[in-house]
Image (cartoon, rainbow, N blue to C red):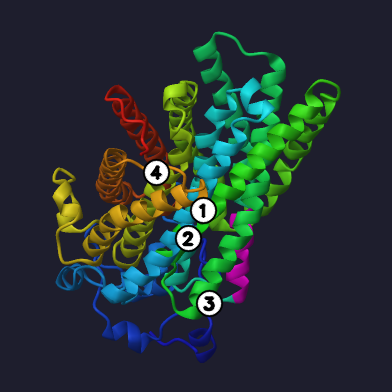
Amino acid sequence: MVVPESQDNKLTQSGSAGWRSIPSLSQLSGSPQHVNSNGNIPSVNAGLYHEPREYSETDSLIPNELYSGSRLSGSTREKDGGHSGAPAESLCSMVLQILVPFLLAGLGTVSAGILLDLVQNWDVFQEITEIFILVPAVLGMKGNLEMTLASRLSTAVNAGKMESTREKWMLIVGNLALKQLQATVLGLLASLMATVLGWMAEGKMPFNHIVLLCSTSVSTAFVASLLQGVIMVGVIIGSKRMGINPDNVATPMAASFGDLITLALLACFSQWFYSFLEFYPYVLYLVDLCYLCLIPVWVSVSSKHPATNILLRSGWEPIITAMVISSIGGLILDKTVSDPNLAGIILYAPVINGIGGNLVSIQSSRISTNLHLNYSPGEVPADRRNCHNPCHTFFGSGANHRSAQVLLLLVIPGQLIFVHTIHVMKGGHTLPSPLFIIVFLSASLIQVFSLLCIADCMVHCLWRKGKDPDSYSIPYLTALGDLLGTALLSLAFLMLWCIGDSGSV
């Protein structure tokens, strides 16, 4: 087959890829043939020309044929461990890249815990206690949207999809518009979930409380999503230019001060709307109406890019399910905070939830990138076709095993630093008791160990089903982190109270 020079220099591909340069025939002829999932060997023509087709939720965000690392035979991948397409990095480089954002994210969650401890005495929190149900739901929702955005863009960077300026900005603008749409809808659903759970717990729910919860939730989700989305894009582009693997830094940086910003907005909006509730209730209705009127704008913008158009139609299941799971954690927090003997949990809940979510999101993003680069959708490594042994997550020679070990080992020193930071920021009047530290660290270890095992199984299962883990796994994992963290922390405080340990000396 002879390709004219004009065609050899520039060809187009259909689908979500947009414009992309194609390797020359000499490069293709020298590369090993790739056997697809149904056992057929695609021809050279099939590699060069793709027929237009409709994409669905079973497609990955960026079609696998566009990844340079995906043109490897199964035998070649088995020999090199399936990591030939992933960015090369040493153990020291990986630890350093993970450590700095991890510490920043931890300081952000510590600050969020301190802030939540301060604002719990505000009038609106005392009068409308259902706001505590909103806290894990809104924080988890914000984390889900930010981390899935970070994971998708990190995969795009590692796959070389951020090289073209036009494609880069189409991808960024489409994802930001989609995120604003998701934030608005999920903010509304979170308030309704808090209303239902509050009514089930108390047996009543005044209508003005419902309106305040709705306005507060939607306003917080919208503004926080906009601010942090812009910051997230800057972090990923900056990481690319500095030669840092964005999988290691993007997801924890997404949560570094995100919890603090979101909680501050939640507290301020709730108190502000509470001041209008008695004399100017129509202000709250106008606020909700304005956000709802922007929904068609976000739909129109996000539908312009094929990749975000896929998620616009099929990306709601994980984030809505995650919001429901986080709301159950919020109900546990609401009931625990209402008990004076367990009120100290409010300081540590954002810390244990945030750290667990940050660590597991790094692992999920790394596994997802590796699968995108080395395997076709539906195809998984031979040792990941079952999830019966959790030890497989931590023991092996691959980069994902090594990162799981590093992330688990960061839990104890990291949480010790954060507990000490809370002690210093609270004025240093009392020291945490040794028993409290042991119980808190045990709860954190159980949470992170469980999440890393679940992440390893979930990401590979989603990929085997042909779903993009970048969009599906992180919402489930962070929501499970919130639920596990809140439940384990509540159990820890209950145990300390039963044996007479106040948590301080």
Picture disc at residue 163: 3
Q: Residue furthest right?
A: 279
Q: Is residue 167 covered in magenta?
A: yes
Q: Taking 381 as reference, is 447 above or below it? A: above
> Residue 380: which quarter of the image?
bottom left
> Residue 74: which quarter of the image?
bottom left
Residue at image x 13%, y 46%?
389
Q: Residues within 10 Å of mark 1 (few under 14, many from 20)?
A: many
Residue 182: x, y in percent? 59, 43
Amino acid type of the residue that numbered disc 1 sits on in the rendered structure: Gly
Which SS class for mark 2?
A: helix
- 1 and 4 marks in contact (CB < 8 Å): no
Which SS class for mark 3?
A: loop
Q: Residues within 10 Å of mark 2 (few under 14, many from 20)?
A: some
Residue at image mark 4: 352
Residue at image mark 1: 108
Residue at image x 62%, y 23%?
126
